[in-house]
Image (cartoon, rainbow, N blue to C red):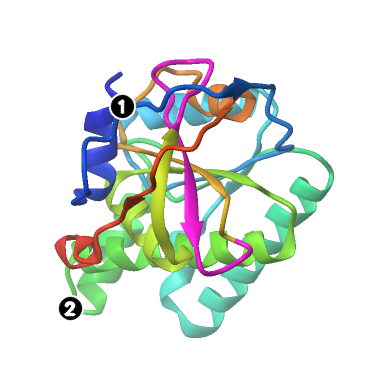
Amino acid sequence: HEVGAAFARAFAEETTGPLDRPAAASTAPSDRGPILAVSGSCSAMTRLQILVAIGAGFAEIAVDVAALWDPVAGRDEQTRIVAEACEQLGAGRSVIVHTCMGSADPRIGDLTACADEQSRTVRELHRELGDTLGRVVAQVLQRSDVRRIVVAGGDTSGRVQAHLGINAMRIAATENDGDAICSVSSDDPIIDGLEVAFKGGQVGGVGYFAEIRDARTVVDSSPMHRTSEETNDEL
C-alpha cells in the first residue's frame, strides 16, 4: 500500500514540502503499550482488518449509531464508549471502536433513516459521526496512558485530527514500510508527541491494526509538516 496516497486521502492537506520518510537516527522497539483504534469506514477491507484485529486480541466496541442522534441517548452512548475503552486499555488490551463493518452493516440503514427523519443529508450525519469519534479519542487520551492511536476512514481522519488540535506532524519509519505512523506536535501536552496512523478505508493489508500496534518507530530530527487548517471545510 502507498503511504503517500493514504496520507493524502486522509487529510488532503497542504504541506511545506514532500512527506519523505526520515532517515533513522536510532531504532528501538516501541514501548507504547495498548493502542486505541477508531474506524468510521464502511469499506470491505476495513471490515476484514477489524475482524483480524479482534482475533489478534483487540477489544471490540461497536457504536450504536442510531442512539447518537438522540440528545440523551447520544450522550450516554458516548460515555459508554469512553468508559469501556478506558477499562480495556487500563487492563493492557488494545481497543477498536467502529461505526460500521462493511456495506451490509445495518447501521448504514440506521444512519439513512435518521437523515430522512431529520431532513438532513447522510453526508452531514457522517461528518457528525466523525466528530463523535474525535470526542471519544480526545476523552480517552485524557483519561488513559495511550500514546498511539489509529484512525480509519479519510473523512473520519480529518474530523479526529481537528478535535485533537494537531499543529504539525512527521512520518516516522516503522518495521513495515507500508505502515506510516506519524509523530504529532500540539499545544496540548496530552497530544504533543502522540503517535498516530491515519488510513483510508481500502488502505493496508488485513493485519493492519495489529501491525500498527506492534510496529517500532525511530527517533529522528526531521522537520514537522504543518497540517492544513482548510482540511475540515473540504469534508
Query: Could you tell whether 57 is left or right of 92 in the image?
Result: left
Callout 2 secondary element: loop
Three-letter residue code for mark 2: Ser
Q: Which mark is residue 218?
A: none
- Residue at coordinates 37% horizontally, 22% vertically from top-left? 204
Residue 126 can be seen, yes or no: yes
Front label number (2 vs 1): 1
Residue 50 at x, y percent in the picture: 50, 31
Which residues make up the magenta segment?
A: 172-190
Residue 100 can be seen, yes or no: no
Q: Residue furthest right?
A: 91
* Residue designated by label 1: 3
Residue 81 at x, y percent in the picture: 63, 60
Q: Specify the quadrant that holds the N terminus.
A: top left
Callout 1 secondary element: helix
> Cα distance, mark 2 to mark 1?
38 Å
- Residue at coordinates 24% horizontally, 69% vertically from top-left? 115
Query: Which residue is at the front of the view, 42 or 135?
Result: 135
Query: Please, is residue 136 above or below residue 157 in the view?
Result: below
Q: Tell me, yes or no, whether the highlighted magenta stretch contains residue 173.
A: yes
Q: Which mark is residue 119?
A: 2
Query: Please, is residue 178 above or below residue 103 in the view?
Result: above
